[in-house]
Amino acid sequence: MKTKQIWQQAAQLESFSVAQIALLLAMHKEQVRKAINHWLKQGYIEQVNNQKRNKIYRVAGNKSPRLGKGNHDGKKYKVRKVCQQIWNTLKILQLVSIRDVLMVTASGKNNVILYLNTLERCGYARGIYYGNKPKKWRLLKNTGAIAPEYIINVGVFDKNLNQLIEYNRPTKSQNKAVNTNNTISLQQ
């Protein structure tokens, strides 16, 4: 919020100093200096004079920096966090049900099933059925602390191995396509 105010004030002025912005916004000079130095390194602001003290700056070009706290998208971070929670649970318990995972993650049942099935298709886990009880997954390949990152319709990217692991089994739709193409009619 404060960095946004600093940027807006700087963008309105043709040239400015740290003291001038701090005075206009009633902020500490150090807080303003820190933001301006950050933008200076990123190329959003340029220094007009070559003095060591009383530096004068101006906004460079029409681009503005990303303002605010943390990840602006939020979605990718949330997906990574959920995958990491599922991965940690699987590493600790070795054999998990959906119920076990749902207790420790902030995700829905469908997302948990999708990730566990993806791990199974990539060879990291195996789905096990116990009679008519719900499916459980057993960890087969523990490659490290960082969870394999789910990539839609491809597989997972394992940062521990720095390697893309693609699905090693055909999907249900691929199985149906194979079966329909290779069927032999016994009735004649």
Image (cartoon, grey):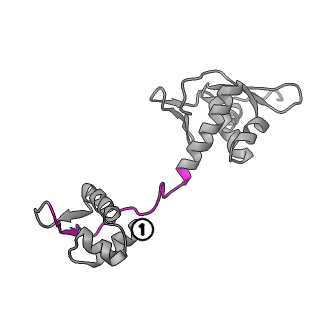
Residue located beneath label 1 in the image? 2
Work out whether residue 183 or residue 14 is closer to the camera in this orientation and state it. 14
What amino acid does circle 1 point to?
Answer: Lys
Q: Position of residue 47 (x, y in %)?
A: 17, 64
Pick the quarter of the image with the N terminus: bottom left
Secondary-structure class at tag 1: helix
Give how far across and how far down residue 128 sits, in percent: 77, 25
In the image: residue 133, left or right of residue 112: right
Give the x, y percent position of residue 160. Answer: 49, 28
Which residue does the image show at 59% across and 23% down from the upper left?
A: 142
Query: Which class describes the residues within 10 Å of circle 1: few (<14), some (14-19), or many (20+)?
Result: some
Q: How many marks?
A: 1
Closer to us: 179 or 48: 48
Residue 161 located left or right of residue 178: left
Residue 171 visible at all: no
**Residue sitting farthest toward the top:** 140
Q: Main secondary structure of the magenta part?
A: loop
Tell me: residue 160, above or below residue 76. Answer: above
In this picture, is 85 found above or below 121? below
- Image quadrant of residue 21? bottom left
Magenta span contains residue 130: no
Residue 47 as seen in the image, left or right of residue 162: left
Q: What span is colored magenta in the figure?
A: 53-76
As drawn, 159 above or below 76? above
Q: Quadrant of residue 152?
A: top right
Q: Residue at x 11, y 66 (%)?
A: 49
Residue 71 image offset from top left, x and y in percent: 48, 54
Task: Quadrant for the C terminus, please.
Answer: top right
Q: Residue furthest right?
A: 132
